[in-house]
Amino acid sequence: MLFQGQEFAASTPFLYFADHQPELAVLVAKGREEFLAQFPSIASEDVATLIPNPEREETFLRCKLDFADRDKNAEVLLLHRELLRLRKDDPLLRHAQRGTYDGAVLGASAFVLRFFGRDQNDRLLLVNLGAHLHLDPAPEPLLAPPLGCVWEVAWTSEDPRYGGGGTPAIDSDDNWNLPAEFAALLTPVSSP
């Protein structure tokens, strides 16, 4: 799920706003304040005073997107467009349903999902939300390529077109290396 403008790193906030009759407006603002009080990070009075009133026009106007951000953040927009295209065009991702994939935790901030296809045409999604992770040995069986194949990067968040620094070899003689804050989709190709 994407929030308004997230696909191009909008500089405008996505605030809660509403437009009700005056009597209901007071109740909505009070209810919002009571709801947010459960969160320790905003429960203090100092922070609570910074939360915009959802009924004020200024709250709504602050949320209006600045579409110049699409050009300023073209790399982020391209990343999101290509992810949506990949989900639409790849049948294994498009038709993923219970029983067609499996997953495992690789570390405190990393995981793998394997989408099973026919004729060893699987997909491997690697996600590392933390620091660089070196798996030596790589104990997870889901990482093994199909028989007679090796994994090849089909998509990576580190693509320079998205502002990334490129992706070093993930599966090598040095075992598995997952760069920090990284995701990649791998496809099998015949072993050389």
Image (cartoon, rainbow, N blue to C red):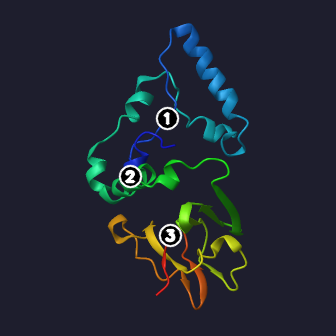
Q: Earlier in the sequence, mark 2 or mark 3?
A: 2
Is 55 placed left or right of 99 in the picture?
Answer: left
Above or below: residue 139 compared with residue 182 = below
Residue at the (70%, 39%) spot, across then down:
43
Taking 37 as reference, is 81 left or right? left
- Res. 140 image quadrant: bottom right
**Label 1, label 3: how far apart the Cα atoms are:** 37 Å
Residue under circle 2?
85
Q: The residue tagged with tag 3: helix, strand or loop?
A: strand
Where residue 144 appears, as percent x and y from the top left, is 63, 76
Q: Which callout, 1 or 3, points to the residue nearer the camera?
A: 3
Q: Dot 2 lies on which element?
A: helix
Mark seen at residue 186: 3
Q: Earlier in the sequence, mark 2 or mark 1?
A: 1
Q: Which residue lies at the image location 55% right of the left edge and 37% below the top edge?
A: 50
Amino acid identity at mark 1: Leu
Q: CA distance from mark 2 to mark 3?
A: 16 Å
In the image, which is nearer the foreground, mark 2 or mark 1?
2
Q: Where 34 sits versus 157, above or below? A: above
The amino acid sitting under disc 2 is Arg
Residue 120 in view, yes or no: yes
> Can residue 122 be seen from the camera position used here?
no
Quickly name the residue at label 1. Answer: 15
